[in-house]
Amino acid sequence: MSKRSRRQRGELADGLRTLRFLLFVAFLFSMPLFFLPGNTEYGYTKSIYTLCFVALLYIVWGGEALVRRRWELDLTWGGFLLAAFLLVSLLSLLGDTPPGVVIQSAALVLAFGLIGILAANTLVGEREIGLALAALLAAGVGNALFGLLQYLGVVVGGAPGGGMNAVIATMGNRNFLGGFLAYIFFPCSALLVLVRRRWGRAAALVGLGFVLAIALFVRQAGVRLGLAAAGLFVCFAAGYWHLLPRGRDLPWWGAWLGVAFAAAGAVAGPAGLLGGFIYAAAGALMYGGGRILRRFRLAW
């Protein structure tokens, strides 16, 4: 093969790699927002959309591998967990569960496992991780805004006239909405480190505050407990690995803490602020526990 042909193949492979990344970011943004108003079960439409989009992503990845004449695959530990989950799902065929339900569930487990493999092999730098998290945060803000407008009765929701029963956003009910917003809050907080421009960090702070406020506003105990447990775990991990912010990042993390208090106060009033201070004290204790465990190796 001539040098010109090799160069053209390399440029084509690089183009397909860029396309794979852009499609993956588009998927992270669009899947949480996708729904069909005429369908009473939003989960089905999201599942079909996910299966089709994941298939498209792997077709593009396969085309890239074909052009490069090699396929580099990083399975990470998630690949082994995916195989274990699939095995457990298929074992249900031995019971009384209808085979169609088992195959459907296994297909969804496989699809979301493949998304994890795509993430591990597509997001390779801070810029790419930052864009992916920004897409997720934008989708969260869109969902939160949609739910708020449904509560106010501006747009049609799950019940006529607005109110809490109308809040379903694109998730189907407010429990799913709150769960999604809670899932993305802490991972998307990493944008305060990954984004270098001040306006980008400020936009991320506003988005994070709005997402947290609506996650608390939907009044789901499971969502609040999940957020609380995740926050304490993050505090413990920060202590164990000594991840306190330093230098120029310190004011932004102080602003992040202020935004979290503001969200709690806006939703729950003085009780929310008091609970926030108590929770901050518990987080400080967890941070100290992580430092002590790392310092004295108490667990082993």
Image (cartoon, rainbow, N blue to C red):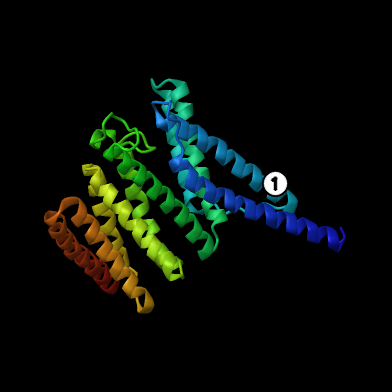
Is 62 positioned to the left or the right of 137 in the image?
right
Q: Residue at x 41, y 27 (%)?
A: 92
Q: Residue at x 33, y 33 (%)?
A: 157
Q: Position of residue 17 (x, y in %)?
A: 65, 54
Q: Nearer the viewer, residue 127 or 217?
A: 217
Q: Is residue 258 above or below residue 68?
A: below
Is 114 positioned to the left or the right of 160 in the image?
right
Q: Residue at x 27, y 39 (%)?
A: 151
Is 92 positioned to the left or the right of 1 in the image?
left
- Residue sitting at the far bottom: 247
Q: Position of residue 73 (x, y in %)?
A: 60, 52
- Residue sitting at the far right: 2
Q: Nearer the viewer, residue 198 or 277?
A: 198
Residue 239 seen in this snapshot: no
Q: Is residue 267 above or below residue 106?
A: below
Q: Is residue 3 above or below residue 154?
A: below
Task: Kindly indicate the quadrant of the structure image that contains residue 146.
Answer: top left
Is 65 positioned to the left or the right of 221 in the image?
right
Residue behind mark 1: 63
Task: Kindly indicate the quadrant of the structure image that contains residue 230.
Answer: bottom left
Q: Position of residue 81 (x, y in %)?
A: 45, 46
At label 1, counting other C-alpha atoms closer than 10 Å, the crowd grade (few under 14, some 14-19, many 20 or more) is some
Q: Position of residue 225 (x, y in %)?
A: 23, 48
Residue 285 seen in this snapshot: yes
Residue at disc 1, secondary structure: helix
